[in-house]
Image (cartoon, grey):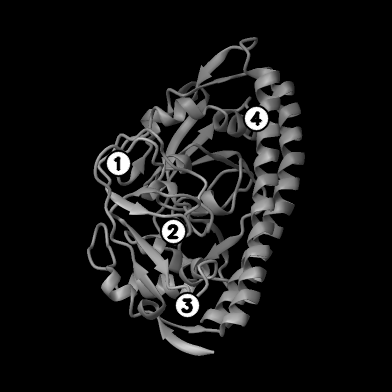
Amino acid sequence: MARVRLGEVATERRETHKGSKSGYPVVGLEHLIPENVNLSMWDESGVNTFTKMFHKGDVLFGRRRAYLKKAVIAPFDGICSGDITVIVSRPEYILPELLPFVIQNEAFFDYAVGKSAGSLSPRVKWEYLREYEFDLPAMDEQRKLARVLWAVNDTIEAYKRLMTATEDLVRGQFVEMYDSGQYPYMMLSDLSEQWLKGQPFKKDDMTEDGKIPCIHYGELFTKYGPIIENVLSKTNRNMIRASKKGDILFPASDVTTTGLTRCSALMSDGVLLGGDIIILRLKSGFCPEYVSEAICCQRRQLLSRITGSLIRHLSANALKTVKIPIPPLDLQQQFADFVHQADKSKSSLQKALIVARNISRKIISENLG
């Protein structure tokens, strides 16, 4: 095993495209999903100002806000944003199929963040990335390592597909039972007793020996679904305003629109909620689990209320006009019971997904550290 610099085994592709973009998929930063090595979204409209080319097998690394941990392998030739660094392996030194895991690596992201410049929108240049050092096994070991890592990644993708299928089942059941016009629609403002904002705190304020349960707004994307039964994080920060069982939580900002088309019903009192969380406190007579899932099913309405370009935002005022169907309370509870069962399945899949990701991280750190 040799200690190498990234620039010794890989290069930056600086190819540009001139002329019509017809037929070329286009990839922006918003299409790169944090901590995912597979590219699953892109644009084919051809309406953009991008000119940077990439080819199948290249690694696309989001050099702006490197802390978001965006790096994928390109499944085709295309055009991408200038805020994406295109990294190409030198196959005589490193297998192309192993390079994505060198980049999709906690140590690499930490290094990239440390070398980034800028305050509001920090970026890192290739001239710094090329100096990143890591351990590189001999070619035979690289082949074995790549096979193992891709097998683990296939398992991760399978878990994600099952979670999506579970969500689709719930959405389909909702539309069939409630969203076909047989029940009156009400605006969220008519359901609300109060709209609140959370209390600002940092991720560093969360600690294993904390006494107060807490939810950072970023955890709404990564750890929780439409129903939050058990709060996973804790803090020792003083709590100014505590949650109330049945509060509906919305993330107020994200780098993608997808992250804002969601909410969660918190089924616990006394939780410290982060500063970028919008809180809808319901009047009596409504089932929080039903309301949460009903809102999540209104993707078009939510998307139409999102503002901003680099950072996307959603406000309480915008949410107040979202409309959802309101069946009788007993039918709301009936659907909530169904969602609870689906959520248990998703929770099991989520736990398995976390285990698989931890295995991948451990293999990478031990062999490519």
Label 1: how many Cα within 10 Å (few below 14, some 14–19, many 20+): few
Query: What kind of residue is marked 3?
Result: Glu
The Cα–Cα distance between marks 2 and 3, rounded to whole angstroms, is 26 Å
Q: Decide which of 83, 292 is in the foreground and name it.
A: 83
Query: What kind of residue is marked 2?
Result: Lys
Q: Nearer the viewer, mark 2 or mark 4?
A: 2
| Marker disc for residue 70 | 2
Q: Secondary structure at mark 3?
A: loop
The image shows residue 181, relative to residue 247, as above or below, that is above
| Labels 1 & 2 near each other (Cβ < 8 A) | no
Label 3: how many Cα within 10 Å (few below 14, some 14–19, many 20+): few
The residue to which callout 3 is attached is: 92
| Marker disc for residue 171 | 4
Quick check: can you spot residue 113? yes
Q: Decide which of 344, 196 is in the foreground and name it.
A: 344
The image shows residue 330, relative to residue 273, as above or below, that is above
The Cα–Cα distance between marks 1 and 2, rounded to whole angstroms, is 18 Å
| Marker disc for residue 309 | 1
Query: What kind of residue is marked 1?
Result: Ser
Residue at 38%, 29% in the rendered image: 305
Q: Nearer the viewer, mark 1 or mark 2?
A: 2
Query: What kind of residue is marked 4?
Result: Arg
Q: Nearer the viewer, mark 3 or mark 4?
A: 3
